[in-house]
Image (cartoon, grey):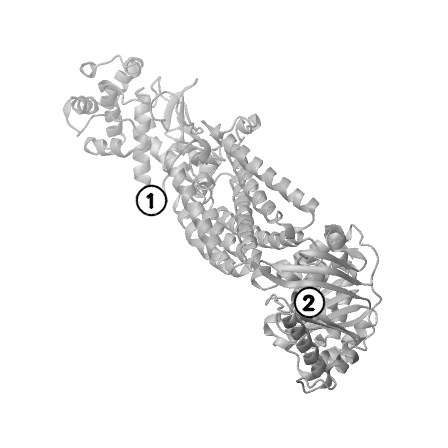
């Protein structure tokens, strides 16, 4: 030790106000460099890979489906939350654990201000990691040709959740400076996520929608594949969740500023105000979630809803031809255009030239709920000139299908499209149709290459298809269908041209079929 | 006077750690001696504004430490080395000292130079980039001293500063203390009477929460002469004699 060293002249200049943020920035730099969060990131990365990314690539290449697992059901939050809470608790308890509480208390900077810098460094690492991991996942999706737009609002909700976990964990550590604070915070975080998921299964509407891993209402229900494709992702519920999670974060941070050692009276008063503001924010968000209503394109919260978000996304369709009929899809579905045209070609060929045959096939947004009492139909006819409307968002497209028994084969998809087309063509609507309609439907399918014997199984396995009650391929309906199908194509065509209107109106009986 | 303490007490539950201490001192090195449990550390923690007194008044650097605003002003001009110094194992020596310089609200522009100076003064320049977890106990103690003096404090409180230092470092530290004491009020709590003899202008001896002696090291030495008290060195004999007298007076009362 060098007593002879001439000490520099002591600075006694009053502190400039601008020095405060600069000082905080330098503290933050030190805290960022020596934070414990980077040590846990490899573990979170592995979990993210196996729990958030890998299962998602088993679904069709659409953002609405790919992100339903990791964003809608909140697996990205589950992967981050408990670990972030644990590390934050470790950092929050640091001064107490390391025997530095006296030394830190004896410094001029208010304890709360110092703690906020430590928390900020922890949260910056966690949030940055979350954003990097999600960005990497989206880049990989882009390379895989995933269609649609990413659900940025749900990413924002995830970021807020990570920040909330860090704040809650930090508060646990600050109040309980023990080496056990970290595992307790991790367990509490895991328990919170588990309870949130369970509540999501139990309560499908109301206050529970605010919980970050409650998947109900996150996406568009049956039409989830079309979220961010035909209409923007609705931000209503994510905004409410951001309010809720930010409220929790603010409450946790405010609580750390309440003890007498945290700082002066003014600062502690500010902490109390902040705590109260957090409670109000979280409480308001819960109240807003109670008013949420399911709409055709997502969850609407009237107080937060912006009508501009109901405007459809403009796009240039990807078009092909099936039996000479133009078939146009949203570009997000471009990869399936060959499957759709191949599926429609035989059934469109079978009705070509009929006055009730569609002049064009076009994909439309899958509206949910259907509104007419029956299950929503993926294929409908309507408009002038008559158009075949394809709500492909209601179907499992060919290829990987995460929540199915296995991948969807092209033939399986084609048969379903043909059934849905025939069902729509005979005018059965969202019901099972009358016997004459069912018989013509069966004959049309037979003409498209689906044997009568295979049809009952097809009817049973097609999603959203109404219960027909036909049973095995026997009985009067199939007898009439066989009789009709046995007639020459020209005769069938001529009969349909003459009787299609009556058939669609449900005025024909089985006996009236030729 | 940089330190003005009037009739200060401090209780922890039923235990009275400090029982009516009054003390005044200005620039110079002030030694606080006493056996284990005498109340030295509690008195230093009150002077460091870590804990408030149960009663009495603590006035430091011309400010009453009971209000938050004045307390914050005091802390800007305070250096403190606790008895049980913790550390952040992942921090380097530079980061550790810089961290506390910033917590003491030093002007950020002056921090790098002040940190380098403080580290040089405790002879840790060669290990400035080493992480604290790699340092020996003595080196950690020196890092602790560096953070205490980084802001060139007007009041420096050192609790057992030489614990863990080797003899060579202890000698160097005493020289540093004498140097600091020329401008600063340095209060050193220690068990080691030789530290007091070598570096302090004034000394107080505490026992059972009270100051039982206050004077110069020479006066303390004089108390031991001819007393027959135990001790290998004159100052130790003075220490033992004063303690024995204080305890017999308490027993008689």
Is residue B138 at least partly visible in the picture? yes
Q: Position of residue A320 (x, y in %)?
A: 43, 33
Quarter holding the N terminus of chain A is bottom right
**Observer-nearest of A230 and A449:** A230
Looking at the image, residue A207 sits to the left or right of residue B166; the answer is: left
Quarter holding the C terminus of chain A is top left
Q: Comparing marks 2 and 1, which lies closer to the viewer? A: 2
Rendered residue at 68%/87% (across/down): B232
Please, is residue B122 above or below residue A177 in the view?
A: below
Rendered residue at 70%/55% (across/down): A109
Residue picked out by circle 2: B210
Looking at the image, residue B192 sits to the left or right of residue A227; the answer is: right
Q: Could you classify mark 1 by the number of other residues whose Cα lies within 10 Å: few (under 14), some (14-19), or many (20 or more)? A: some
**Observer-nearest of A467 and B59:** B59
Q: Secondary structure at mark 1?
A: loop
CA distance separating discs 2 and 1 = 84 Å
Residue picked out by circle 1: A407
Q: Position of residue A199 (x, y in %)?
A: 40, 39
Please, is residue B190 above or below residue B49 in the view?
A: below
Q: Position of residue A326 (x, y in %)?
A: 43, 28
| Numbered mark located on residue B43 in the image | none
Q: Chain of mark 2?
A: B
Q: Could you classify mark 2 by the number of other residues whose Cα lies within 10 Å: few (under 14), some (14-19), or many (20 or more)? A: many
């Amino acid at each position: 030790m060098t007593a002879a060293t001439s000490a520099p002249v002591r600075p006694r200049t009053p502190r400039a106000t601008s020095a405060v943020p600069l000082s905080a920035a330098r503290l933050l730099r030190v805290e960022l460099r020596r934070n414990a969060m980077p040590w846990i990131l490899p573990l979170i990365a592995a979990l993210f890979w196996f729990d958030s990314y890998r299962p998602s690539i088993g679904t069709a290449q659409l953002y609405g489906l790919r992100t339903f697992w990791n964003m809608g059901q909140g697996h990205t939050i589950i992967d981050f939350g408990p670990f972030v809470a644990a590390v934050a608790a470790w950092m929050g308890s640091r001064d107490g654990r390391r025997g530095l509480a006296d030394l830190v208390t004896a410094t001029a900077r208010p304890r709360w201000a110092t703690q906020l810098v430590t928390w900020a460094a922890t949260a910056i690492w966690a949030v940055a990691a979350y954003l990097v991991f999600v960005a990497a996942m989206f880049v990989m999706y882009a390379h895989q040709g995933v269609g649609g737009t990413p659900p940025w609002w749900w990413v924002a909700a995830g970021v807020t959740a990570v920040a909330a976990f860090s704040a809650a964990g930090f508060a646990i550590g600050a109040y309980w400076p023990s080496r056990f604070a970290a595992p307790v915070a991790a367990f509490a975080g895991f328990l919170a996520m588990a309870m949130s998921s369970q509540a999501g299964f139990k309560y499908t509407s109301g206050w529970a929608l605010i919980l970050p891993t409650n998947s109900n209402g996150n996406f568009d229900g049956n039409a989830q594949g079309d979220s961010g494709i035909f209409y923007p992702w609705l931000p209503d519920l994510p905004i409410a969740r951001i309010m809720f999670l930010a409220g929790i974060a603010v409450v946790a941070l405010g609580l750390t500023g309440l003890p007498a050692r945290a700082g002066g009276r003014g600062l502690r008063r500010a902490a109390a105000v902040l705590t109260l503001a957090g409670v109000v924010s979280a409480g308001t968000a819960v109240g807003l979630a109670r008013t949420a209503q399911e709409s055709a394109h997502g969850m609407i919260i009237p107080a937060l809803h912006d009508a501009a978000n109901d405007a459809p996304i403009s796009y240039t369709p990807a078009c092909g031809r099936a039996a000479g009929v133009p078939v146009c899809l949203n570009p997000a579905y471009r990869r399936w255009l060959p499957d759709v045209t191949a599926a429609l070609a035989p059934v469109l060929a079978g009705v070509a030239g009929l006055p009730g045959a569609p002049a064009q096939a076009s994909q439309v947004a899958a509206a949910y709920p259907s509104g007419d009492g029956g299950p929503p139909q993926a294929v409908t006819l309507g408009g002038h000139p008559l158009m075949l409307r394809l709500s492909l968002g209601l179907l499992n497209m060919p290829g990987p299908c995460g929540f199915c028994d296995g991948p969807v084969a092209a033939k399986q998809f084609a048969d379903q499209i043909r059934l849905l087309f025939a069902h729509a063509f005979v005018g059965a609507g969202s019901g099972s149709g009358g016997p004459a309609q069912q018989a013509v439907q069966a004959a049309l399918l037979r003409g498209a290459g689906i044997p009568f014997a295979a049809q009952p199984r097809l009817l049973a396995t097609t999603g959203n298809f109404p219960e027909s009650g036909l049973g095995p391929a026997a009985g009067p309906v199939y007898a009439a269908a066989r009789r009709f199908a046995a007639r020459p194509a020209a005769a069938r065509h001529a009969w349909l041209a003459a009787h299609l209107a009556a058939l669609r109106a449900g005025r024909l009986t089985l006996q009236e079929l030729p | 006077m940089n330190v003005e303490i009037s009739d200060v007490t401090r209780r922890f539950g039923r235990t009275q750690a400090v029982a009516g201490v009054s003390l005044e001192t200005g620039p110079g090195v002030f030694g606080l001696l006493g056996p284990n449990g005498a109340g030295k550390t509690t008195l230093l923690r009150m002077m460091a504004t870590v804990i408030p007194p149960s009663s009495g008044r603590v006035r430091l650097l011309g400010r009453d430490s009971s209000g938050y605003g004045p307390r914050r002003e005091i802390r800007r001009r305070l250096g403190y080395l606790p008895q049980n110094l913790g550390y952040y194992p992942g921090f380097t020596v530079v980061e550790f000292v810089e961290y506390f310089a910033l917590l003491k609200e030093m002007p950020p522009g002056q921090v790098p130079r002040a940190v380098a100076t403080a580290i040089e003064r405790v002879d840790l320049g060669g290990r400035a980039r080493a992480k604290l977890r790699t340092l020996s106990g003595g080196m950690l103690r020196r890092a602790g001293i560096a953070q205490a003096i980084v802001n060139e404090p007007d009041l420096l409180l050192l609790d057992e500063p030489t614990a863990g230092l080797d003899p060579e470092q202890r000698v160097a530290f005493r020289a540093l203390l004498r140097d600091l004491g020329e401008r600063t009020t340095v209060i050193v709590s220690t068990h080691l009477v030789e530290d007091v003899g070598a570096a302090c202008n004034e000394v107080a001896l505490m026992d059972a929460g009270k100051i039982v002696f206050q004077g110069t090291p020479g006066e303390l030495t004089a108390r031991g002469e001819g007393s027959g008290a135990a001790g290998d060195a004159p100052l130790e004999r003075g220490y033992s004699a004063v303690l024995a007298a204080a305890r017999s007076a308490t027993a008689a009362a």
